[in-house]
Amino acid sequence: MASVSATLPPPLLLTQRKPNLTSVQKLPFSPIRDRRSHSMSLMVKASGKSSESSDLDVISSIQNVWDKSEDRLGLIGLSFAAIVALWASLNIITAIDKLPVISSGFELVGILFSTWFTYRYLLFKPDREELSQIVRKSVADILGQ
């Protein structure tokens, strides 16, 4: 369980009004008053699925693929080829980035695509769920599940 604590300065909180404190106490964090400095500290605790379990899922999936593989030399070669392709693509992108006009055009395309992606998949809850299903399906297809 993760927790975050913060101390807010007095101008951001209305400490003289009592009704605000009762509404704050109904929220999922607990206020802690400091009488000396007239500031308020907040303690927030998060619960739910941690990222450690998802990391373990990925590691166990990779171990399952490694154990089920009959051609481990081919798997090593494919991994090496993927690393070389990544290195080559990074070098190509660096070379293109040095060209004055093309890099500005790519930045514009990147900004437009990011805006479209945010509108299409991240802005509304049903679209986020659709994106989550697409990612899960893709990961399952890649790992052969």
Image (tube, rainbow, N blue to C red):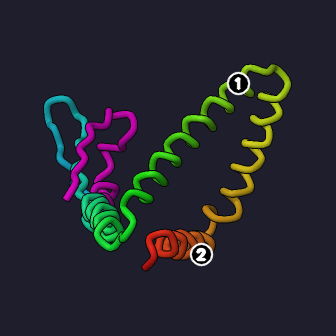
Residue for point 74% across, 56% down: 116
Q: Is residue 19 magenta?
A: yes
Name the quadrant of the C terminus.
Answer: bottom left
* Front of the two marks 2 and 1: 1
Residue 60 visible (yes or no): yes
Residue type for callout 1: Ala
Please state if 110 lies on the left or on the right of 28 as rendered: right
Q: Which residue is mark 1?
A: 95
Return the residue nearer the eye: 20 or 46. 46
Q: Which residues are magenta?
A: 1-26
Residue type for callout 2: Glu
Image height check: is 93 above or below 44? above
- C-alpha separation, residue under disc 2 versus residue under disc 1: 36 Å
Any mark on residue 86, and which? none
x then y, percent, for residue 51: 30, 59
Q: Which residue is mark 2?
A: 130
Disc 2 packing (10 Å; few <14; some 14–19; many ≥20): few
Return the residue nearer the eye: 141 or 75. 75
Residue for point 30% across, 59% down: 55
Name the quadrant of the N terminus.
Answer: bottom left
